[in-house]
Image: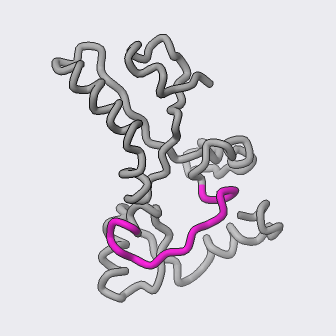
Amino acid sequence: AEIYYENPEIYDDLYSSPNRITRPKSVDLLNLLESGTLDYAFEYKSVAIQHHLNYIEFPDQINLGSWEYRDYYSQVNITLDDGTVVYGSPILYGITIIDNASNRDLAVEFIRFIFEHSSVLEENGQNPVVPGITNNVSAVPQELRDYVREE
């Protein structure tokens, strides 16, 4: 956000706010929002939609929801208390089939369904990456390779 809005104080202002309310789980923030204890919270769009909450979207350049902006996101980082440096990256869900799946054919059909009916995900606030992204297309079942690209 500091880069996008050209304001180097955003992080410090948010972090040092005396009114900052954090919870270990987002569901705890939901309860506070739904009860009217909180006026707003930072939450995933999908959660806002699924809980019928009003929301505003951040631009793709800062919402961590776009694969296309992965290089832009990686310009920022945060150092955790243990010294670990974490760089910005897209927040994406993955899907896989384990090698010894007892119902492999059904798993393939389910994943095919997900790709062919991605509008169901969109309606629930998930932004599907279509085609899907893999780092090893040879590990993807042959029946699903038309739905992915290797990067």
Visible in this render: residue 85? no
Give the extent of the magenta segment. 49-63
Residue 104 place in picture, x, y as percent? 23, 19
- Which residue: 28% across, 32% down? 110
Task: Name the quadrant containing residue 36.
Answer: bottom left
- Which residue: 69% across, 48% down? 73
The N terminus: image quadrant: bottom right
Residue 58 counted in the magenta span: yes
- Farthest bottom residue? 36
Residue 5 place in picture, x, y as percent? 78, 68
Comparing 100 with 19, the one in front is 100
- Which residue: 66% across, 63% down? 59
- Farthest right residue? 6
Residue 99 against residue 15 in the figure, above or below: above
Comparing 97 with 149, the one in front is 149
Residue 138 place in picture, x, y as percent? 48, 11
- Which residue: 77% across, 62% down? 4
Q: How many marks?
A: 0
- Farthest front residue? 116
Q: Main secondary structure of the magenta part?
A: loop
Visible in this render: residue 88? yes
The C terminus: image quadrant: top right
Q: Is residue 11 left or right of residue 44?
A: right
Q: Is residue 60 left or right of residue 107?
A: right
Residue 37 place in picture, x, y as percent? 36, 87
Colour theme: one colour
